[in-house]
C-alpha cells in the first residue's frame, strides 16, 4: 500500500453568516498522506440505491483521523459518507464530491 496522495482533512465548527444565521464553517485541518482506491462495484450500486454517489476511497492511518466529515483532494472538496476501520492502524474514508456546499 502506497501512501502517496496528499489530502487535507476538514472539520466543521459553528459560525454565523452575514445576516446572523447559525451555520457550519469548514476549517482545514491536518494534511495527511493517503492511499487512493476506486470504489468497489458492489458498493457503488448499493450506495446509488439510496441516493449516494461515492467517488473514491482513501486509506489513512487511524491515528490521523478525528471524525472529520470532509476532506480536500486536488483542490476539490469531498464529503466523507462512510468510514470503515480495517484494523487498529488503518481506516477507509469513502468520499462523495461536493458542489456549492451540497453533495453531488
Image (tube, rainbow, N blue to C red):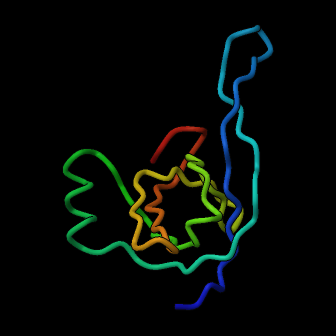
> Residue 1's spot in the image, x, y percent?
52, 91
Which of the 4 quarters of the picture holds residue 94?
bottom left
Q: Residue furthest top?
A: 20
> Residue 79's spot in the image, x, y percent?
52, 50
> Residue 9's spot in the image, x, y percent?
67, 56
Q: Residue furthest right?
A: 18
Residue drawn at point x = 50 percent, y = 73 percent: 90
User: Is residue 85 shown left or right of residue 98?
Assistant: left
Which of the 4 quarters of the picture holds residue 84?
bottom left
Q: Is residue 79 above or below residue 36?
A: above
In this view, the residue in front, 100 or 62, is: 62
Q: Residue furthest bottom?
A: 1
Residue drawn at point x = 33 percent, y = 50 percent: 52
Total tally of numbered discs in the picture: 0
Q: Is residue 41 above or below residue 52?
A: below
Residue drawn at point x = 48 percent, y = 68 percent: 91
User: Is residue 68 shown left or right of residue 86?
Assistant: right
In this view, the residue in front, 68 or 17, is: 68
Q: Is residue 86 above or below residue 48?
A: below
Residue drawn at point x = 76 percent, y = 8 percent: 19
> Residue 63's spot in the image, x, y percent?
62, 65
Amino acid at each position: 500500500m502506497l501512501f502517496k496522495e496528499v489530502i487535507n482533512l476538514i472539520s466543521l465548527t459553528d459560525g454565523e453568516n452575514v445576516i446572523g444565521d447559525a451555520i457550519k464553517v469548514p476549517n482545514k485541518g491536518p494534511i495527511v498522506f493517503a492511499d487512493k482506491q476506486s470504489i468497489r462495484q458492489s458498493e457503488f450500486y448499493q450506495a446509488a440505491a439510496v441516493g449516494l454517489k461515492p467517488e473514491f476511497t482513501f486509506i489513512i492511518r487511524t491515528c490521523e483521523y478525528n471524525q472529520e466529515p470532509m476532506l480536500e483532494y486536488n483542490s476539490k472538496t469531498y464529503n466523507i459518507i462512510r468510514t470503515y476501520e480495517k484494523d487498529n492502524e488503518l481506516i477507509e474514508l469513502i468520499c462523495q464530491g461536493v458542489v456549492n456546499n451540497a453533495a453531488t
